[in-house]
Image (cartoon, rainbow, N blue to C red):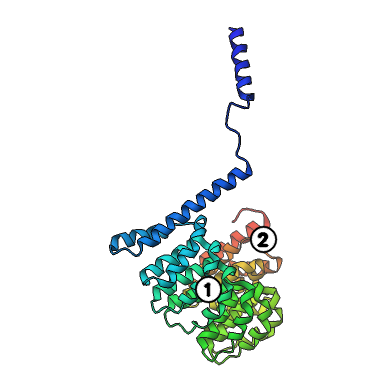
C-alpha cells in the first residue's frame, strides 16, 4: 500500500507541474482580440435592432426597443448607427435609440450633440429619454448646457426636474453658463439654474458671491433656492452667513427653512439656529419637518441643551415624545452643561419625561435608574 500511495503522489505532482496539463493563460494581445470580438458582436446586434425598429410589424418594433433597453457599454461601436437613427427615426424610434445611448453611457459621448438637438423634439417622451441619456453621460455632456438652460421654462414637472438633475451632473464646466442664467427674467429659469448649481455642490462654489445677491430676489422660490445652493457649498460659503441670518427673517417660510438648513452646514455658531430648527421640526410640511429633524441629529450633542430646554417647556405629550426620540437619536455623551437641565426634567408634569430624565442621568452617572 505505501508504494501505491507514493506512486499516485508522484503522478499527481508530475501532472500538476506539467505545462501541458492545462491551457496557458491568454496573452494581453489575445485578450484584446477577444474583447474586440465581443464589442463587434454587440455592435452588430444593435444594428439589427435598429433595423427592426423600421419594421411594419409593431410587435417586432417593440421587441427591438426592449432589446435596445438592455444594451451595455460594450455596444459603443454602434454609436454612429444610433446617432443616425436618432436623427431620422419617428418618435418611437427616437425614444428607443436615446434609451440605448444612455445604457451605453459615456462611451457614446459622440452622440451628445445629437441628443442636444433632440431636446427640441415636440414629444415629451423623446425629450425625457434624451435627458436620461445625457444624465448618464455626466460631465461628458457638458457641451449641451446652453440647450438645457434654454428649456428651464418647462411647465411639466417631471421634465423640469430632469433638466435640473441633468445640469447638476455636468460639473464645474457648466457653472459659468448657469451663473449667466441667473440674470434671466423668468424666475423658473433662475430657480432651475440655482438647483443645478446646488447639485453640482463644491465645484460650483465660485458662484457663492452671486448667490448671496440672489437672497434678495423678488421671487421667494429663487431666494429659497439660493439659500439651498449656498448650503450645498458648506464652509466654502461661510462669507454668506450674515446674509443667510438676514434670510431667517424672510416673510416666506420656505426661504427661512432653506436659510436655516444652509447655516447648519457652515460650522458657524449654532445658538441662533436651534430654535428655528425646532420650529421647523414641528412644521406641517413633512419634507421640512424631516429635514429639520435630520439637521438637528447631524448637529449632535451641540443641539442637546436647546432640546432639553424645549422639552422642559413642552406640555403636549406627542411633542414630548418627538423631542425624546430626537434626543435618543443624537445619543450620548450627555454634555455637562445639559446635566442641570436634565435634573429639572425630574419634576416635569409628564411621567414619561420624568422617567426619561432619570434614565439619562443614570447612564451619565454610571448607575442603574431608580
Query: Label 1 to label 2, Cα distance in Å?
Result: 56 Å
- Where disc 2 sits, the SS reads loop
The correct choice, above or below, for 176 with respect to 79 in the image is below
Any part of residue 307 in sight = yes
The correct choice, above or below, for 328 with respect to 198 in the image is above
- The N terminus - image quarter: top right
Callout 2 crowding tier (Cα within 10 Å): few <14, some 14–19, many ≥20 = few
Observer-nearest of 359 and 305: 305
Q: Position of residue 113 (x, y in %)?
A: 53, 73
The correct choice, above or below, for 284 with respect to 357 in the image is below
Q: Residue at x 39, y 70 (%)?
A: 89
Q: Position of residue 301 (x, y in %)?
A: 66, 66
- Where disc 1 sits, the SS reads helix
Callout 1 crowding tier (Cα within 10 Å): few <14, some 14–19, many ≥20 = some
Q: Mark 1 highlights which residue?
A: 113
Observer-nearest of 197 and 124: 124
Residue 333 is marked as 2
Amino acid at each position: 500500500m505505501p508504494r501505491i500511495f507514493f506512486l499516485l503522489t508522484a503522478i499527481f505532482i508530475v501532472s500538476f507541474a506539467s505545462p501541458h496539463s492545462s491551457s496557458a493563460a491568454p496573452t494581453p494581445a489575445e485578450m484584446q482580440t477577444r474583447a474586440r470580438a465581443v464589442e463587434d458582436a454587440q455592435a452588430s446586434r444593435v444594428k439589427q435592432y435598429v433595423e427592426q425598429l423600421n419594421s411594419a410589424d409593431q410587435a417586432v418594433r417593440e421587441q427591438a426597443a426592449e432589446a435596445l433597453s438592455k444594451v451595455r457599454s460594450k455596444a459603443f461601436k454602434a454609436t454612429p448607427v444610433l446617432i443616425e437613427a436618432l436623427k431620422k427615426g419617428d418618435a418611437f424610434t427616437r425614444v428607443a435609440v436615446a434609451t440605448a445611448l444612455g445604457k451605453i453611457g459615456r462611451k457614446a459621448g459622440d452622440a451628445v450633440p445629437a441628443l442636444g438637438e433632440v431636446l427640441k423634439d415636440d414629444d415629451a417622451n423623446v425629450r425625457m429619454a434624451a435627458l436620461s441619456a445625457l444624465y448618464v453621460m455626466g460631465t461628458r455632456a457638458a457641451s449641451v448646457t446652453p440647450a438645457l438652460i434654454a428649456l428651464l421654462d418647462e411647465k411639466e414637472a417631471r421634465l423640469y426636474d430632469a433638466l435640473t438633475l441633468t445640469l447638476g451632473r455636468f460639473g464645474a464646466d457648466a457653472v459659468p453658463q448657469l451663473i449667466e442664467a441667473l440674470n434671466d427674467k423668468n424666475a423658473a429659469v433662475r430657480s432651475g439654474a440655482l438647483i443645478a448649481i446646488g447639485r453640482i455642490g463644491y465645484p460650483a462654489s465660485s458662484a457663492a458671491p452671486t448667490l448671496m445677491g440672489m437672497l434678495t430676489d423678488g421671487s421667494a422660490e429663487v431666494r429659497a433656492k439660493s439659500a439651498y445652493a449656498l448650503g450645498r457649498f458648506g464652509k466654502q460659503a461661510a462669507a454668506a452667513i450674515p446674509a443667510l441670518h438676514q434670510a431667517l427673517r424672510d416673510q416666506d417660510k420656505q426661504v427661512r427653512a432653506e436659510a436655516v438648513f444652509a447655516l447648519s452646514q457652515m460650522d458657524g455658531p449654532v445658538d441662533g439656529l436651534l430654535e428655528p430648527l425646532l420650529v421647523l421640526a414641528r412644521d406641517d410640511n413633512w419634507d421640512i419637518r424631516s429635514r429639520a429633524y435630520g439637521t438637528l441629529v447631524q448637529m449632535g450633542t451641540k443641539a442637546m441643551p436647546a432640546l432639553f430646554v424645549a422639552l422642559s417647556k413642552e406640555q403636549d405629550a406627542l411633542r414630548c415624545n418627538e423631542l425624546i426620540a430626537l434626543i435618543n437619536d443624537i445619543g450620548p455623551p450627555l454634555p455637562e452643561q445639559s446635566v442641570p437641565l436634565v435634573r429639572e426634567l425630574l419634576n416635569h408634569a409628564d411621567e414619561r419625561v420624568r422617567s426619561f430624565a432619570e434614565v439619562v442621568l443614570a447612564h451619565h452617572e454610571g448607575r442603574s435608574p431608580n
